[in-house]
Amino acid sequence: MGATLSHAATRAVYDRIGGWLDTQRFYEDAAIAELFTHSAFGSATSVFELGTGTGRVAARLLREHLPAGSRYQGVDSSPTMVGLARARLQRWHGRATVTLTEGSPRLDAPQAAFDRFLSTYVLDLLSADDIRAVLAEAHRLLAPNGRLCLVSATHGRSTLERLVMGAAGGVHRLSPQLVGGCRAIDLRSFLEAERWRVSHHQVVSKWGIPSEVVVCLRRGDGS
């Protein structure tokens, strides 16, 4: 999968990017809409998000999809992103919290405390070992029959997508910082059948940038 940024280097990149991260919505929003359509957030009572970024996705979730009594907990390793997200989510104070972490895939949250685990354009920053560790933590945090809701950059299929993602991959190999640490991955290859049942899978492409959307039901504990 190639080299990835260290946790400290990732934090530094996203501290520097700041609010500019929202400009990526030109290709991200369609994939996130696809995720929301198939994740049944309207029946969710508790959501954990890994990688809140500027809080844009969380605000859309709270404003348009989550029931009034539901709660949201987000974490991010960038102090800049945590500050931006807290400001953006202020109107949901009391329901929504955002916490700064050191970037470890080990998450400080109770077992089986959430019915949705959300992460968009984060796993494609991580090493293969960290992706597996995050998914193990997601399984621990989710209640039985909870849903895992993921979006990441993925490999190109069409000629345009292969050109765009090939160029991005070349830049990543040269210097991961230049593309924010992101590279194409295959989410489904990390989903262990004994832990997850895929309920929705789709690749959404905008401007030659393909995004993989995956929703899974948690298996285990008799589920």
Image (cartoon, helix red, strand yellow):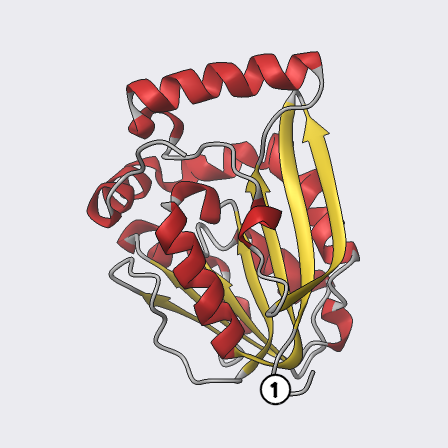
Q: Is residue 90 above or below residue 212?
A: below
Q: Residue at x 56, y 16 (%)?
A: 164
Q: Quadrant of residue 177?
A: top left
Residue shown at the point (30%, 64%) measured from the top left = 100
Is residue 181 something one can see in this rendering? Answer: yes
Residue 166 screen position, x and y as percent: 51, 16
Camera-nearest residue between 48 and 22:
48
The residue that disc 1 covers is: 221
Quadrant (top left/top right/bottom left/bottom right) for the N terminus: top left
* Local secondary structure at mark 1: loop
- The amino acid type of the residue labelled 1 equals Asp
In the image, is residue 111 above or below residue 33? below
Place residue 133 in its image quadrant. bottom left
Mark 1 nearby-residue class (10 Å; few <14, some 14–19, many ≥20): few
Above or below 193: residue 67 = below
Position of the C terminus by quadrant: bottom right
Residue lying at the far left in this picture: please name it. Answer: 8
The answer to whether residue 93 shows anywhere in this view is: no
- Give whichever of 39, 185 is nearer the camera: 185
